[in-house]
Amino acid sequence: MVYDINVRILRNRIILHLVLIVLSLFISTDALSQGKKSEKIDKIIKEYYDARHVNGVVLVAERGKIIYKKAFGYADFAWGIKNKVDTKFRIYSASKQFTAMIVMQLVQEEKIDLDVPITTYLPYYRKNTGDKITVHNMLTHSHGIPDPPMDSMPLIITASPEETIKKYFSGDLLFEPGEKFSYSGVGGYTILGAIAERVSGKSLKELLQERIFDPLGMKDSHYYDVKTVIERKAVDYRYEGKRLVHRLQPYYIISAFGASCIVTTVDDLYKWDRALYADKLLATDFMKRYLKPHIKMGENASYAYGQCISHYTKGQEKRTVYWHSGGTASIIFREVDKQHLILVVNNIRNLKADEIAEQIHSLLE
C-alpha cells in the first residue's frame, strides 16, 4: 500500500514537472516573439527619430498587453529636458473621442437626444441653421458649419461658450446637414462641449474628471487651457523649414473646448483603451452605438463618434482599425477585434504619426 502511494506521488510529480516544462516553452516562445517584435518596432521608431519625425513617446500593446514603451527626444529643448514615458502631451483633436463619450453618457441618461436640433440645448444659436442640425450631425462632422480661418481668431478666447459660438461658429452652412462628411477641426466639437455643459450644469473640465479620468484612474490627464501650469507637460513646437519654433495657434478656448482639450500620458491612454472593451463608461448597447460607423469618409473609411474607422486587407484577412490623429503630431490607433493599440504622441507638429502607426500595426498578428 505504501509502495503504491509513493508510486502515485512520483508519477504525479513527473506529470506536473512535464506540464511546467511545456508551459515554460510556450512562455519562452511567446517572450521571444514579443522581443523580436519589440526590436523591429524600435528599429522603425529610431529611423523616424533620426529623420526628425519622432519626438515623444510610443506605446504598443498587442492583444491588450504592452510590448513596447519608449520615450524619444526632448520635452523642452530650451532647457534640454528629455521626454520620459510619463511626460504629458496635448493630444489635440484626438480629444474628440472623449467629448463624444461624455455626450453619449448624457444620451444614456436621457439628458441629450441625438436626433433633435442643437437649438434644443443652445437656444441662443441662430435658428435658421441650428434648427436643421442635430446632435448626431455634430458628432459625425455632417453639420455643415464652417470653421473660421485661423488667422481671423485671437490667440486666446476668454469669452463664454455662448459668446464664442455665436461669434465664431455659427456661419452660413456649407451644405445641408447630413448630406456628407466634412471634418470640422474646432467648431463642431466645441459646440458639443457647450451642449454637454448646458444640460449637465457642469463644466467640461468637471465632466471629464468625474466621468472619465477619476473612474479609470487616469491621474495624469487634464483638461487643458493655456493659462494652467501642468507639471511634466511637454512644450509644443513646430518646424519652420529646418528651424524649430514654439507652436502657437489661435482658438485657445478657455471654456467648453471639446475639440482639442486634453493633456495626457501614454499610460493613461492605455487605460482609456482598455475601458472601451468593458462596461465601465457606457452600457453595451450605447458603446456599440458609440463605435458604430455612422457616415462614409471615403471608399474604405467611415466615422464613428469621435473616431475614424478604416478597413483594409492583409493577405486574406480583413482588418478594421479605429484611429484619430491630433494636431498632425500624435495618433491613437486601435484594432478593436484583436485589442491592438498603438500610441504615438509627440510635441512637434507635422510629424508622421499615422505613417508610423501603420508600419507598426503591420507587425502585429
Image (spheres, grey):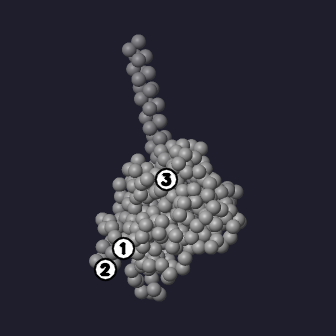
Mark 1 or 2, which is nearer the eye?
A: 1
Q: Mark 2 points at which residue?
A: 78
Label 1 or label 3, whichever comes before in sequence order: 3
* Crowd tier of the residue under label 2, counting other residues whose Cα lies within 10 Å: few below 14, some 14–19, many 20 or above: few
Look at the image and tell me in which quarter the N terminus lies.
top left
Q: How far across and down, in percent of the image, does residue 172 sit?
A: 62, 73
Kind of element beneath mark 3: helix
- Secondary structure of the residue carrying tag 1 is loop
Apparent side of residue 305 relative to residue 267 in the rendered image (left or right): right
| Residue 57: % across, % down | 41, 66
Position in image of residue 215 (x %, y %): 41, 47
* Residue beneath the point at 34% across and 70% down: 227
Asked if 26 appears above or below 53 in the picture, the reply is above
* Residue name at image x 50 percent, y 65 percent: 190
Q: Can residue 270 be seen in this view?
A: no
Q: Are marks 1 and 2 in contact (CB under 8 Å)?
A: yes
Residue drawn at x 51%, y 68% is 165
What's the mark number on residue 286?
Answer: none
Q: What residue type is labelled 1?
A: Val
* Front position in the image: 54 or 198: 198
Q: Nearer the viewer, residue 272 or 13?
A: 272
Check disc 3 and give the amino acid type: Val
Q: Name the residue under label 3.
A: 199
Image quarter of residue 79: bottom left
- Could you classify mark 1 by the number of other residues whose Cα lies within 10 Å: few (under 14), some (14-19), or many (20 or more)? some
Asked if labels 3 and 1 touch by Cβ distance under 8 angstroms, the answer is: no
Q: Please, which residue is most extreme toward the left here?
A: 79
* Amino acid residing under circle 2: Ala
Q: Mark 1 points at which residue?
A: 235
**Residue located 57% across and 43% down the image:** 284
